[in-house]
Amino acid sequence: MEKVISLNLDKVLSFVGKAEIEGKAALAKQYNEVLHKGSGKGNDFLGWLNLPTSITAAHLEDIQATANTLRQCEVVVVVGIGGSYLGAKAVIEALSNSFDWLQKDRKNPVVVYAGQNIGEDYIAELLAFLKGKSFGIINISKSGTTTEPALAFRILKKELEDSVGKEVAKNRIVAVTDAARGALHTLAKKEGYKMYVIPDNVGGRFSVLTPVGLLPIAVAGFDIKKLVEGAAFMEKNTTPDVPFEKNLAEQYAVTRNELYKKGKKIEILVNFNPKLHFFAEWWKQLYGESEGKDNKGIYPAAVDFTTDLHSMGQWIQEGERTIFETVISVANAHQKVEVPADAEDLDGLNFLVGKRVDYVNKMAELGTQLAHVDGGVPNLKIEVPELTEYYLGQLIYFFEKACGISGYILEVNPFDQPGVEAYKKNMFALLNKPGFEKAHEEIQKRL
Ligand SMILES: O=P(O)(O)OC[C@H]1O[C@](O)(CO)[C@@H](O)[C@@H]1O
């Protein structure tokens, strides 16, 4: 039998009863069906729903071929923000050596990111790092108009053209953007860049299984076929005809909403594996942008344990009881390190001799879960057999599917993000962008 990620609700049941969860099974199924019928809010953004099973081998081969060209560079810069970089970074970090950038004998290009901030020092330091190196750029923007990546790309494009000339640069730049609109689309057409399209009906935060995520992941040397296979497996196992007891997406969506109704307004995604730090960042955008609207929505937070047990642990154990945790537990580490014997035992650790480091980590995980539940923090546990492309694919689709169902249970449109425009309008007004002249005058009065 194919291995699968699992969801364990045992440590939730003293806060929300089994009957309460099962009582909402029909509702979750109803909203799952709404998703599949395309009859709910935001139904023009459901392209992600059947995406894994509809990706063709030819499409994956084409992405791989483009990746192979870029892989000839020493460095590839992925330009994008939000959903246009977090999925790729989440998967690449989860699968990479923790000291990847320090590896000398490299099989893969170094993947770095730009356009995810407006830090002047960040971009200056990136330019300094790229000096004298062969580099390529993947410029990703669904709308093609987002300021942060546009600004970074303008600077990086000039740097590349100055160093290798326009003709060579053209073949080292790939654009991933809208099918027909946007400044990036126009620019890519004019300059003759290889271009990939983000389907109109796939929103940024749901786009990791399009070239947005697949191209950088392939460039980093990971198996995009396996990633898509894992997602396709989860797609088939979360359809409305899969019974609630087996339908992880429906169960997760119901449980978090029942907890929310009981005043648990913050969900903390917990990992005990530092490689999952950026997976949590991806998850935060997925749930934050999907559910935080109409003055409601669970606040998605994240911690890396045991690291943050020594900083946030106190708050989680004894602070305001408005939180619950969803723990991503990786069952098997890939490598083995055993605790060595020490004749003097000055650190008092000889009781662990011969034990694996992962065993200590697992006991920390179990001890933390029990302590937090005792402290009034419900704990959901998602177990991932190991960190591979296949299981990450399962995990990605599981969270996407649950997010759609959960948003509908909350009665919001999970597929729009009107709230992110407010800061953009003010920034454009302050910068006196053409078209914002009146807003510029108005905002000056407020300063
Ligand atoms: O891919 P784009 O259009 O540059 O957008 C990047 C991100 O910005 C947002 O649109 C928010 O402004 C996110 O939803 C999106 O993932």
Image (cartoon, helix red, strand yellow):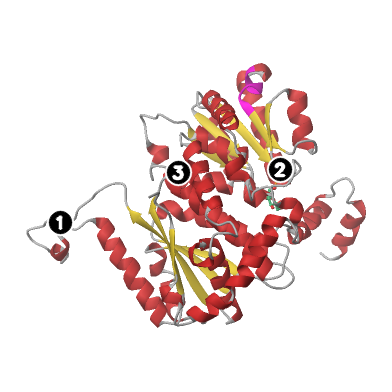
In this orientation, which residue lies closer to the viewer: 359 or 125? 359
Looking at the image, is mark 3 or mark 2 earlier in the sequence? Answer: 2
Q: Which mark is residue 209?
A: none
Q: CA distance from mark 3 to mark 2?
A: 24 Å
Q: Which mark is residue 389?
A: 3
Estimate how packed mark 2 is, as few (under 14), some (14 to 19) or many (20 or more) residues with alpha carbons within 10 Å. Answer: many
Q: Please give the name of the residue rendered at 55% of the width and 37% of the height, measured from the top-left corner.
A: 216
Quarter assignment of residue 272: bottom left
In this orientation, which residue lies closer to the viewer: 407 or 116? 407
**Residue 171 colored in magenta in the image:** yes
In front of the other: label 3 or label 1?
Answer: 3
Q: Is mark 1 within 8 Å of ligand 1?
A: no
Residue 87 position (above or below residue 341): above
Mark 2, secondary structure of its residue: loop
The region drawn magenta spans 168-173
Mark 1, secondary structure of its residue: loop
Estimate how packed mark 1 is, as few (under 14), some (14 to 19) or many (20 or more) residues with alpha carbons within 10 Å. Answer: few
**Dots 3, 2 in contact, CB < 8 A:** no
Residue type at numbered disc 1: Gly
Residue 146 position (above or below residue 447): above
User: How many numbered discs sit on the rendered protein?
Assistant: 3
Mark 3, secondary structure of its residue: helix
> Furthest-left residue in view?
343
Disc 1: which residue: 354
Q: Please give the name of the residue rendered at 58% of the width and 81% of the height, measured from the top-left corner.
A: 263
Q: CA distance from mark 3 to mark 1?
A: 30 Å
